[in-house]
Amino acid sequence: MLNVKTDFQDRVNEVNIYFTFIEKFIPNSDNDDLNKILKSNLLLMLYNLIESSISNAIEEIHNDIHRNSISYDLLKVELREVLVRHLKNHINPKDFVLAINNIALDIVKKSFNKGRISNGNIDSKKIRELGASYGFSYITNYSQTKNGACLLTIKRRRNDLAHGTFSFTEVGKDYTNEDLEIIKNEAINYLREILDNIERYLIRQDYKIAI
């Protein structure tokens, strides 16, 4: 998880640098539309942080299982179901057969497609679903994270911008600097706790059945 957490912190630093710029720049700017655009961009950066952090963490679960040569039949039932769904929905059977040497081990690695984790739709509900499927805890400190409720707002606003439903100025006008700081801090705190949960899950190898 070291690389996952390092990447997470690098992106958090980017977000914080950008927010500091907004705090300093916006009060002194005469360009109201530019202010709104800058605020909208922060929401895009936050979604980038969410998607990268969760996708990287789920990939690390698959990598950890594969590195430890954990056989398919030793995995928890819920995780075995995840692998079968991945195999059914995302892998060409011929490509899979040509790529594997030991199906009980290689299915963990070869059935995984990192790009399929999100499809641009990661929020706290999706993270809870992933937690239930893989077996890691999605419980966080509500006072610091609000259990990731802000991720839904970030996802929706990102999709509004990505699909052209609203312009950057239309989205940005809805948020003050104070609003954005609250959203930013809750999102970062939530993701950090989820990554800590996944790290503990990997250390304990909670993806394995009890023997």
Image (tube, helix red, strand yellow):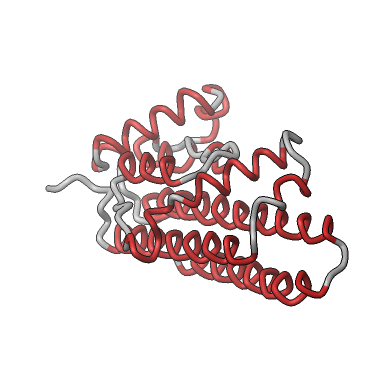
Q: Quadrant of the N terminus?
A: bottom left
Residue positioned 71% across, 58% down in the render: 39
Percent position (x, y) of residue 53? 52, 56
Q: Is residue 49 above or below residue 95?
A: below
**Viewer-closest of 57 and 173:** 173
Percent position (x, y) of residue 35? 78, 61
**Viewer-closest of 200 and 67:** 200
**Viewer-closest of 92 and 116:** 116
Q: Is residue 130 above or below residue 69?
A: above
Query: Taking 64 as reference, is 156 left or right?
Result: right
- Residue 175 image-quadrant placement: bottom right
Q: Is residue 26 above or below residue 151?
A: below
Percent position (x, y) of residue 27? 76, 73
Query: Taking 196 as reference, is 35 left or right?
Result: right
Furthest-left residue in this view: 211
Q: Is residue 46 above or below residue 209?
A: below
Residue positioned 46% across, 28% down in the render: 87
